[in-house]
Image (tube, grey):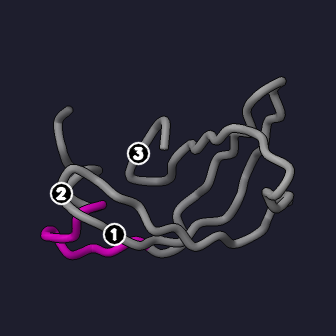
Amino acid sequence: MIDLSDHGARFSMEKSSDHTELRIGDIVVFSIITPYGKASCSGRLIWTQHQEEYYSWGIEFVLVSEDPGDPLRCLIESPF
């Protein structure tokens, strides 16, 4: 995860021959490890970008916990 807001996130990974091609509009479920622990969320893919060595994509959150103790929620609310 590269960027995070209360509305979504940007992800990036190295290109490999075994990754699945994502399409705009796809719903993706993530398991994210944060400094506060492991969390789950889902989001709709809103953009993709192919670079020479990396594949990046942006998601708009569809489902993220509203529990203030959820690790992802804690990261979203963190001032850092």
Residue 67 % position (x, y): 20, 75
Which residues are drawn in magenta?
64-72
Q: What's the mark number on residue 20?
A: none
Q: Secondary structure at mark 2?
A: loop
Check if mark 1's residue and mark 2's residue have beta carbons within 8 Å.
yes
Residue 24 % position (x, y): 82, 58
**Label 1 crowd (10 A; few <14 / some 14-19 / many >=20):** some
- Quadrant in the picture for the C terminus: top left
Q: Which residue is mark 3?
A: 5
Furthest-left residue in view?
69
Q: CA distance from mark 1 to mark 2?
A: 9 Å
Furthest-front residue in view?
17
Q: Residue at x 83, y 34 (%)?
A: 50
> Disc 2 vs disc 3: which is toward the camera?
2
Residue 69 % position (x, y): 13, 70
Q: Which residue is mark 2?
A: 36
**Left or right of residue 4, residue 53 in this image:** right
Q: What's the mark number on residue 39?
A: 1
Quadrant location of residue 72?
A: bottom left
Asked if residue 71 shows in the view, the reply is yes
**In this view of the protein, which residue sits in the foreground, 57 or 46?**
57
Q: Residue at x 56, y 42 (%)?
A: 10
Check if mark 2's residue and mark 3's residue have beta carbons within 8 Å.
no
**In this view of the protein, which residue sits in the foreground, 33 or 58?**
33
